[in-house]
């Protein structure tokens, strides 16, 4: 049955290998290489500058604003998406709401299906200071003092952006937990009920330990997304006003395509690569130790 | 698949409910009943508020896509007096039609190539023993750890030097490359489950290796190939960053990138802009409603996003 021709499997593998080398691995390595040079897309020369792009980066306050905003993104997303997603999933799987669960799940999942451009342009309407629904809503419930230009104000812009991301992704993470909860043997809950455990107790003693693995996957995924997010801030604020809502990727874009500082932008990309690799290593470590026991 | 498991717990739930009634602890039951009412009320309140939070904005988008800009500005909460379907015609003619066509082409070819190449490689990993197999497998799925954002600048440069910048291929090739690791893993695990006896008897019947792939493996793997198509299609239809960087010609832009242009073109015509947003949201929502089980299977196999 095994083939005598040793090269045959490589024929099947060839297209994948060529594409991965050319469009995944080569760019990753050349990006690190580029980050040691000073260059622009319109000139043909590249000046080797050693670590100076990185040194400048660590002196650049915008870089730290961006990094801080990514950290905000990560913290808020972990709480709302992973914490909130788990609670929402547990509620939707409770027999109390069984009659409406399928309908609600579908509605909650809808934002996941809609392109982020559509959602961001829609939220621009809601955040509009004069005509937007958010300020109108606040006015109508007597909270006029809270109304503001959500995206035009440096203090709120990044949080308005983060809020929209949560709005889009909560249904997604909840769906992951729903799939995981459905795999829990119902005998566990029965036994707990017979022992007199209430819903809250069941949640903490059965649901949470049983979905531990999915919670870990969701945590890592959310973390990676928080440090690579681009679309939402780019469309809603473009990193503004005055770089206040910049994240690493939008600053990368800005440096590359508005300032033509390609080497500097590559250095930012290298920092993103380092962060995502650290997250992946942690993931692999925990995954391995999880397999051991 | 999800539905079936759901029904199962349903049956058990009813059964266990009767058990609880049999075993109450008398001294606690009164407080417990009140607690349960308060708890369930809270649950309903949360679910309804969250429902409104998700559904109202989408409802607002659809309703206002049928209204006049002035009405939207003066009365944002209102319903349309008469339905302005011409907003949809305006949106369609102001570029959406073109972006749609581009997205269909890019998404279609991306799906086709991703699945074809991944299936071929998965076949090699599932069917052959060869030197360096594990190392190559790690090489192939290692791409899962690499964020596309990191390769933005080198890919931009590469596309220009390959003369692919401002062509559909500038999007298709990176999309295929970044989807392969996951789709390959998905298809491989399915292929591993196909019994050896089936392919062995086909071999005895005179099929060569490639025929076993096309006549046995591919037809048997329809469910996983559908899942792969749905996941890849979702990704390619919605991708934004490569779409705005690797294509500058408005004629070639896909929907997510084109909408940015569209917004600038229709600055004050809010009704038509919202109509454009609604049209753009529809395809994947419809795909989900009709192919829900493939979405769910994809999710339980490791995800849609990222």
Image (tube, coloured by chain):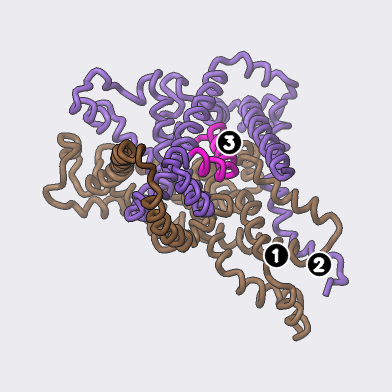
1 vs 2, front mark: 1
Residue B121 sits above or below residue B160 on the image: below
Q: Identify the residue at image location x=62%, y=45%.
A: B159
Mark 1 residue crowding within 10 angstroms, few (<14) / some (14–19) / many (20+): some
Query: Circles 1 and 2: CB distance less than 8 Å?
Result: no
Residue situated furthest front in the rendering: B26
| Mark 1 secondary-structure assignment | helix
Q: Identify the residue at image location x=45%, y=31%.
A: A233
**Residue B11, x across and y down, in percent:** 42, 61
Earlier-in-chain disc, 2 versus 3: 2
Residue A256 sits above or below residue A209 on the image: above
Q: Identify the residue at image location x=32%, y=53%.
A: A100
In which chain is the residue bearing label 2?
A
The label number, if any, that marks residue A224 in the structure image: 3
Residue A67 sits above or below residue A212 on the image: above
Give the camera-side residue of B277 and A220. A220
- Kindly report the distance in space between the C-alpha atoms of the residues bearing marks 1 and 2: 19 Å
Asked if residue A257 shows in the view, the reply is no
Q: Which chain is brown?
A: B
**Residue B202, x across and y down, in percent:** 73, 81
In the drawing, does residue B131 fall left or right of residue B33?
right
The label number, if any, that marks residue B192 in the structure image: 1
Q: What stretch of residues is rendered in magenta?
A: A204-230
2 vs 3, front mark: 3
- Kindly report the distance in space between the C-alpha atoms of the residues bearing marks 3 and 1: 30 Å
Q: Identify the residue at image location x=60%, y=25%.
A: A261
The residue labelled by disc 2 is A8
Residue A196 sits above or below residue B218 on the image: above
């Amino acid at each position: 049955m095994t083939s005598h021709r040793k090269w045959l499997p490589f024929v099947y593998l060839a297209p994948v290998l060529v594409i991965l080398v050319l469009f995944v691995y080569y760019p990753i390595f050349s990006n690190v290489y580029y980050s040691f040079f000073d260059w622009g897309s319109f000139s043909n020369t590249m000046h080797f500058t050693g670590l100076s792009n990185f040194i400048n980066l660590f002196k650049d306050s915008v870089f730290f604003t961006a990094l801080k905003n990514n950290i905000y993104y990560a913290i808020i997303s972990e709480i709302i998406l992973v914490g909130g997603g788990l609670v929402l999933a547990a509620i939707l799987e409770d027999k109390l709401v069984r009659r409406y669960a399928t309908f609600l799940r579908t509605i909650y999942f809808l934002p996941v299906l809609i392109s982020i451009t559509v959602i961001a342009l829609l939220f621009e309407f809601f955040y509009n200071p004069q005509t937007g629904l958010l300020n109108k809503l606040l006015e109508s419930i007597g909270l006029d003092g809270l109304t503001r230009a959500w995206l035009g104000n440096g203090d709120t812009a990044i949080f308005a952006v983060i809020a929209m991301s949560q709005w889009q992704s909560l249904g997604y993470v909840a769906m992951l937990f729903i799939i995981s909860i459905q795999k829990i043997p119902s005998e566990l809950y029965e036994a707990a009920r017979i022992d007199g455990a209430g819903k809250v107790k069941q949640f903490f003693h059965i649901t949470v330990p049983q979905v531990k693995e999915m919670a870990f996957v969701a945590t890592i995924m959310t973390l990676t997304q928080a440090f690579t997010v681009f679309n939402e801030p780019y469309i809603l604020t473009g990193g503004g006003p005055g770089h206040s809502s910049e994240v690493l990727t939008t600053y990368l874009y800005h440096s590359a395509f508005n300032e033509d500082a390609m080497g500097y932008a590559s250095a930012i990309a290298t920092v993103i690569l380092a962060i995502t690799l650290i997250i992946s290593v942690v993931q692999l470590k925990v995954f391995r130790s999880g397999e051991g026991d | 698949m999800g539905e079936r498991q759901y029904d199962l717990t349903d049956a058990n739930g009813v059964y266990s409910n009767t058990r609880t009634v049999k075993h109450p602890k008398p001294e606690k039951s009164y407080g417990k009943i009140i607690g349960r009412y308060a708890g369930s009320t809270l649950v309903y309140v949360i679910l309804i508020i969250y429902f409104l939070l998700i559904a109202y904005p989408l409802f607002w988008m659809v309703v206002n896509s049928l209204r006049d800009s002035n009405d939207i500005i003066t009365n944002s909460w209102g319903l349309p007096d008469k339905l302005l379907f011409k907003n949809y015609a305006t949106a369609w003619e102001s570029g959406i039609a073109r972006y749609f066509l581009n997205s269909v082409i890019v998404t279609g070819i991306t799906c086709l190539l991703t699945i074809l190449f991944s299936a071929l490689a998965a076949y090699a990993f599932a069917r052959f023993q060869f030197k360096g197999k594990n190392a190559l497998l790690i090489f192939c799925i290692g791409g899962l750890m690499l964020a596309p954002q990191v390769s933005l600048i080198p890919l931009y440069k590469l596309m220009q030097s390959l003369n692919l910048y401002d062509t559909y291929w500038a999007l298709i090739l990176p999309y295929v490359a970044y989807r392969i690791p996951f789709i390959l893993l998905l298809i491989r695990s399915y292929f591993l489950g196909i019994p050896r006896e089936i392919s062995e008897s086909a071999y005895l019947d005179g099929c060569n290796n490639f025929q076993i792939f096309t006549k046995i493996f591919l037809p048997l793997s329809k469910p996983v190939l559908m899942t792969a198509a749905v996941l890849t299609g979702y990704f390619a239809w919605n991708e934004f960053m490569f779409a705005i960087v690797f294509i500058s010609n408005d004629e070639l832009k896909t929907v997510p990138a084109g909408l940015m242009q569209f917004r600038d073109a229709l600055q004050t015509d809010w009704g038509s802009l919202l109509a454009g947003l609604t049209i753009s949201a529809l395809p994947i929502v419809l795909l989900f409603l009709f192919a829900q089980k493939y979405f769910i299977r994809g999710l339980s196999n490791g995800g849609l996003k990222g």
